Image (cartoon, rainbow, N blue to C red):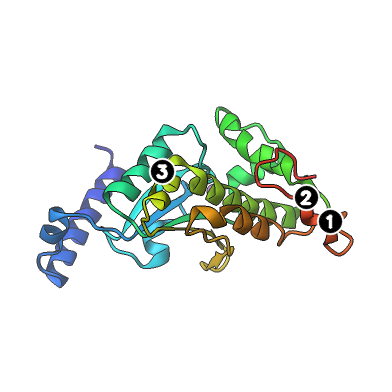
Amino acid sequence: MTPEPKILFEHNRAWAARMEHERPGFFTRLMAQQRPRYMWIGCSDSRVSANEITGLEPGEVFVHRNIANVVVHSDLNALSTIQFAVEHLKVEHIMVVGHYGCAGVRAALQGTRIGLADNWLRHIRDLKLRHRKRIDHLPPEQQEDVLCEINVIEQVGNVALSTVLQDAWERGQKITVHGWVYGLRDGLLKDLHVSMDDAASVVDTFRAAIKQYPRSTDGGGASDADTTFDSLDDD
Ligand code: CO
């Protein structure tokens, strides 16, 4: 073993000993069952760790992460994780958490080729295209922040429209999907006010959240009535 990974084992032994010392029986209790109330869907970025940011301990948050926190309707990895969280763990809240300064969102915005992930990030390029009237007129640094936020809102919609959430709400399960964004600059989470807690409110909540970003041609915002959730185009 090279020295670097070796130090991680040293850290691990020290951490396990400290936990057991400070809270005797911690691991035994966790071993019996995990009962997290929260599921976190976030970016793989090493600076955005679900537990540390929220002060949650092992056993308290069920996590799915990928590049740029994308939830694709046919992604069996994400869907299986969400289904397990909803149907077996019975989490009460699912948070889709993006972050400013996301390299994946930036690559999608700028059209930078980075490799295989270009195909994954195509989902975000599609969002940039769909919402171009809300994005293209902004200064470059603001475009990136807005696309980070719009990506979160869209992924909240994708979670809410998944068969897993639709079925859960249909049988009366109490579960809310939230959209947040994390600031690398200040370490703070921001709520994007796109929380959805039943099937009936999904479209209206989505529309209201997207309308927070004015179009260049809005002329006061009166022309937003034609924004539909599932049209491919935001015109
Ligand atoms: Co990221």
Q: What residue type is labelled 2?
A: Asp
Q: Where is residue 97 in the image (x, y as percent from the top left)?
A: 50, 55
Query: Which one is earlier in the sequence, the residue at label 1 or at label 3?
Result: 3
Question: The C terminus appears in which quarter of the rendering?
Answer: top right
Q: Helix, strand, or loop for circle 3?
A: helix
Q: Mark 3 points at which residue?
A: 164
Name the spot of residue 80 as percent of width and height, x first.
36, 38
Q: Which of 205 and 9 is in front in this view?
A: 205
Q: Distance between the residues labelled 1 and 3?
A: 34 Å
The kind of secondary structure element at disc 2 is helix
Front one among 66 and 70: 70
Instruction: Using the rendered image of the protein, determine whether residue 23 is visible from the camera's viewpoint.
Output: yes
Q: In this view, does 7 lie to the left or right of 137?
A: left
Q: Distance between the residues labelled 2 and 3?
A: 28 Å
The one of 116 and 163 positioned closer to us in this rendering: 163
Q: Name the residue under label 1.
A: 223
- Dot 2 or dot 3: first in sequence order is 3
* In this rendering, position of residue 107 left or right of residue 33: right
Q: Do the residues labelled 1 and 2 touch (CB within 8 Å)?
A: yes
- How many C-alpha atoms fall within 10 Å of the one at disc 3: few (<14), some, or many (≥20)? some
Residue 138 visible in image:
no
Amino acid at dot 1:
Ser
- Which of 119/164 is in front? 164
**176 left or right of 216?**
left
Q: Does the residue labelled 2 lie within 8 Å of ligand 1?
A: no
- Screen quadrant of the N terminus: top left
Residue 222: which quarter of the image?
A: bottom right
Q: Name the residue under label 2.
A: 226
Q: Are marks 1 and 3 in contact (CB under 8 Å)?
A: no
**Which residue corresponds to the image point at 36% horizontal and 56% vertical from the top-left?**
173
